[in-house]
Amino acid sequence: MEKTARKNITITVDKNYCIFAAVMLHSFFLNNAANEYYIHIVTNVRNPFFKIPLYYILKKHRAKYTFYFIDEKTIQASGKVVITLHITIATYFRLFLPSVLDKIDKTLFLDSDMIIDGKLNELYDTNIEQYALGAVSTPNEERTKTLNLSNAYFNAGVMLLNLSYLRTNNFEPQFIQFIQAYPEKIIFWDQDVLNATTGKFMLPIATKWNGMANLINANETTRIIHYAGSHKPWSGHSEHPLKDKYFQYLQTDFILQLLEKCYRFYFRTLAKLKK
């Protein structure tokens, strides 16, 4: 039995993305009734300073939520995980959701680099009883070939997860086994691991639920805008056609704007000091 009758939303976040996760959740709550959802936040952050934006937004919208701490040693013990580019080890937290959320049967996972621009009831209510997860396919012939996929490669930024199915079929050990056995095949981190292990059991969902720059459809209303890749709207280098949506939602809350500026200044200053 689940702890709550509400629908479950799950995010994973480290200290670098707490502020952007707060903006994403703010956009979510502006379009979805908070009392219909329960927010699960999986993080390696101990310092409450970094979580201030998250606490602020959750309290502002009177959301029900739980923080779960996950130790990086848990990930490192899985094998030599691949970390490159702008990615941190936090991306691998997704692989452990079946055990971290051990009382939850179903959840909608959302990346932090997103804006939720509509209601998500239709997506959440999708029947995935016979699947490990639902996700949006994204063309990638190289990954499909290298990982020997029978289905199309999918993006893991938005996943409707059947946690009960994943636990029953022992997918977590399979994730770890793949990391240990095929590190040379992993380029896109845990996303490659998920594709290689759950790809046969994935239900394709409409692209409107994961609006990456290469998947924006002019004839379809994008509900979830995903700023995938290293160029984010807040970095000033994004080429996403809907990059302005980030600032539109940010500007609806003055305190959130101040927090976002403070955190961006903090991390820019910290990066300069490290040079």
Image: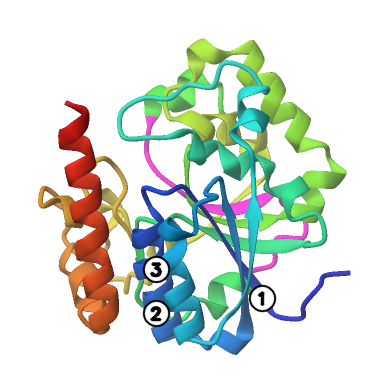
Q: The residue tagged with tag 1: helix, strand or loop?
A: strand
Q: Nearer the viewer, residue 204 or 118?
A: 118
Res 242 quadrant in image: bottom left
Residue 111, quarter of picture: bottom left
N-terminal label among 3 and 1: 1
Q: Along the polypeptide, which appears first: circle 2 or circle 3?
A: 3
Q: Earlier in the sequence, mark 1 or mark 2?
A: 1
- Residue 235, x across and y down, in percent: 16, 50
Where residue 169 sits in the image (x, y, percent)?
A: 83, 40
Q: What is the number of the mark on residue 144?
A: none
Q: Do the residues bearing badges 1 and 2 touch, measured as CB atoms within 8 Å?
A: no
Q: Secondary structure at mark 2?
A: loop
Amino acid marked by disc 3: Pro
Q: Nearer the viewer, mark 2 or mark 3?
A: 3
Along the line of sight, the residue nearer the viewer: 94 or 19: 19
The three-letter amino acid code for the residue at tag 1 is Lys
Q: Residue 118's mark?
A: 2
Q: Quadrant of residue 261?
A: bottom left
Q: Which residue is mark 3?
A: 53
Please name the amino acid that badge 2 sits on: Gly
Q: Which residue is mark 1?
A: 7
Magenta stretch bounds: 126-140
